[in-house]
Amino acid sequence: MDYLSLLNPSQAAAVMQIDGPCMIIAGAGSGKTRVLTYRIANLLEQGVDPFNILALTFTNKAAKEMRARIEKVVGGAAAKNLWMGTFHSIFARILRSEADKIGFPRSFTIYDTQDSKTLISQILKELELDDKLYKPGMVLGRISAAKNKLISVQQYLNDPVIRQDDEAALRPKIGVIYQQYANRCFKAGAMDFDDLLYQTNVLFKDHPDVLNKYQNLFRFVMVDEYQDTNYSQYLIARKLAAKERNICVVGDDAQSIYAFRGADIQNILNFEKDYPELQVFKLEQNYRSTKTIVKAANSVIKNNQAQLRKDVFSDNEEGPLIEVLKAASDNEEGKLVANSIFEDKMSHHLSYDDFAILYRTNAQSRAMEESLRKLNIRYKIVGGLSFYQRKEIKDLVAYLRLTVNPNDEQALRRVINYPKRGIGDTTIAKLINAAEESNHTIWEVVANADQFLPTRTANPIVDFAEKIKAYTAVAAKEDAFEAAKFIAKNSGMIEELYADKSIEGLSRYENIQELLNGVKAYTEDPEREDKTLGAFLQDIALVTDADTKDAQQEGEAVTMMTIHSAKGLEFRNVYIVGMEENLFPSQMMITSRADLEEERRLFYVAITRAEKKLTLSYATSRYQWGNLRSCEKSRFLDEIDPQFVDFKFAATPSAGPGESPFGHVFERRSNLLPTPARKTVAKGYTPPADFQPSDTSNLQTGQRVEHPKFGFGHVTKLETVSGSTKAIIEFEEVGEKTLLLSFAKLRVLG
DNA sequence: TAAGAGTGTCTTTTT
DNA sequence: GACACTCTTA
């Protein structure tokens, strides 16, 4: 392939480099993905077997995208066989096949953050520690930081510096909690996110033969977003590449935004030390953005002290100035942004897909959503509450987890009394006690409850254990879908949710269906080798909403997300909202220089997402914790070289008819309606102000109706079950919905 | 033991 | 203003 005609000289040089270590410093928008794609294509063209290439990305989405692009260049078969994924998913896969070597079951559970926090709370209670002083989130953060630096429990307990730190912070027991936590995870056959990396390091350290095997397998190692790797990840990459030394890392120190998670810029400097023969390539030409945007971004990042040599430039047009909008309230900010999007779309004939709204915190999406909905602008939210974090989903998943790994303590606690079977807190406390005293796992006590408890209390527990054993037997024979279907039915969950005829109940029921559909799709995927329940669970533990979203997206829509999740993406027009002190930069990040610089890099990332036009906005007052607070504009606004900025001010501080200056008095969400499912695209339908529900007792099939949230539609079916009538309505915008007439507010139109 | 009311904490970002 | 957790009562 003629790479020189496809790439600029420095890009081509990076692509053609094959042997030995290399580092690509890639400025924002400099065609990094392009280079990585062609670099892999070139390796394949040179005869390297795809199985021998390991490419580690930061998100599943990035991996998927790159695989798709490589597929276009070299064809499907080769692309499919590449080892490509996040650190977490690749090494979870490897740990699964090597689990026995480090004493974990093959079907180990992956605890999510919630599981971890709950476990810490439980430990605090058992150790009789004050959970105000030892906040679970903070304790988990400390444990996580230790693991990411590969500090074992023993090292933690013995290290005088750490002890002094913890004592100075008046939290001397963190080491003990860490010890308990690690213990409990091990007994439960569970790993948290950090363990996936930590235990990989343990595996490679204690089993040189295993390390050797993977060193021979992964002859070429690539790491994307290298500036965001932590020590634990750095070491894994280094160990794997130790033999062949064919390692290529790609990164941009200016875009390092995950220090809070242990990412360490030091890794870039370490890299130069580890490989003196290192070749460095710099990609400095930005192909994405206008000159204005690139220069403005440079003027911001220049305020950071800690940064590497780099000079990003653009040959694109100058482009329009950066607009700054000032609003009186968060609601008005939403309105200004929505109006601006609407006008821009019309005057430039754009698609809503061209627009993105970025914010610092997920909570900010609310005000934006409302304004967009009022203008009928469709939008999608990336991230936020994940499908897998919903209660009903977690419940069913807990059953599945327990089936695959009965020692999974968090799953056990979640469903041992759900649906209700008369096992209360007192009984559970007794079980835990018994487990502790007899040195058994909780499951072992549960499975033999009659030996530990009087018959009357033991009976429901024994029944429960029998159920789980039966599920395990089914899961051993059947594929994930058959097993999950059986469990959902037999556990009584389906029945319980079906009996709940409220609207929320219906939506929970539908969510379970959707999960089962997901399992089905998983099992029917012809390329999937391992179709067991265990494999499925491992898969979903590492998938976030952001990864699955795009596929089911139909129709154009404005994208909304946090700046963190916008990393790596680009949009024609970008709005960065909430440019206020204590919000961006965040209140918790303004105390130290290093933290503030991370915030500034985050701002840099946000700015450089924009191709043509960038708009910044701030509000002088904002609702926080339910009450109004006044805000100052962000210091970052003043850091942009003023020649690139056009300050626009809100015309009037107030708003439309019937609205108070600070909004918010109306527009309260009916609590009958479930919060809009973040999984799907929320449609912009606004009910007219005069909406009045009609009497629906004589509703007929075929009639046209209006719903305050779903818009217009017609009744396709009516059915009455045990006294309550359900209407199946085909809505024009949102498709088919099943509504209970006793709850649904419908206006009959004809 | 279950259900309901009341209270306090919280929001930084993600695998 | 949301949610998890605690307290109260049947």
Image (tube, coloured by chain):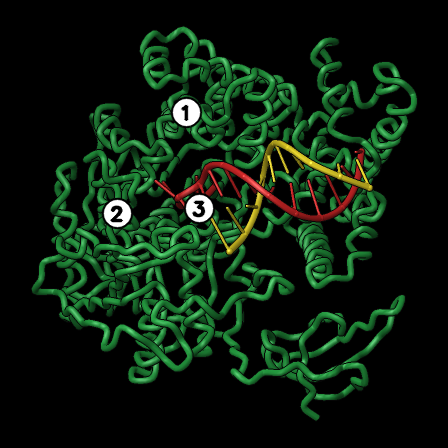
Chain colours: A green, B red, C yellow
Q: Earlier in the sequence, mark 2 or mark 3?
A: 3
Residue furthest to the bottom in view is A750
> Is residue A308 visible in this depiction of the protein?
yes
Q: Are marks 1 and 3 in contact (CB under 8 Å)?
A: no
Residue A696: x and y in percent read 76, 82
Name the amino acid type tagged 3: Thr
Q: Quadrant of the N terminus of chain A?
A: bottom left
Residue denoted by label 2 = A585
Q: How many marks?
A: 3
In the image, are marks 1 and 3 on the same chain? yes
Q: Secondary structure at mark 2?
A: loop
Q: Quadrant of the C terminus of chain A?
A: bottom right
Q: Quadrant of residue A296?
A: bottom left
Q: Secondary structure at mark 1?
A: helix
C-alpha span from label 1 to label 2: 23 Å
Is A339 or A254 nearer to us in this picture?
A339
Q: Which mark is residue A59?
A: 3
Residue A664: x and y in percent read 43, 66
Q: As drawn, is A50 to the left or to the right of A670?
A: left
Q: Residue at x 46, y 57 (%)?
A: A382
Residue denoted by label 1 = A142
Badge 3: residue crowd in 10 Å (few <14, some 14–19, many ≥20) = many
Residue A650: x and y in percent read 23, 73
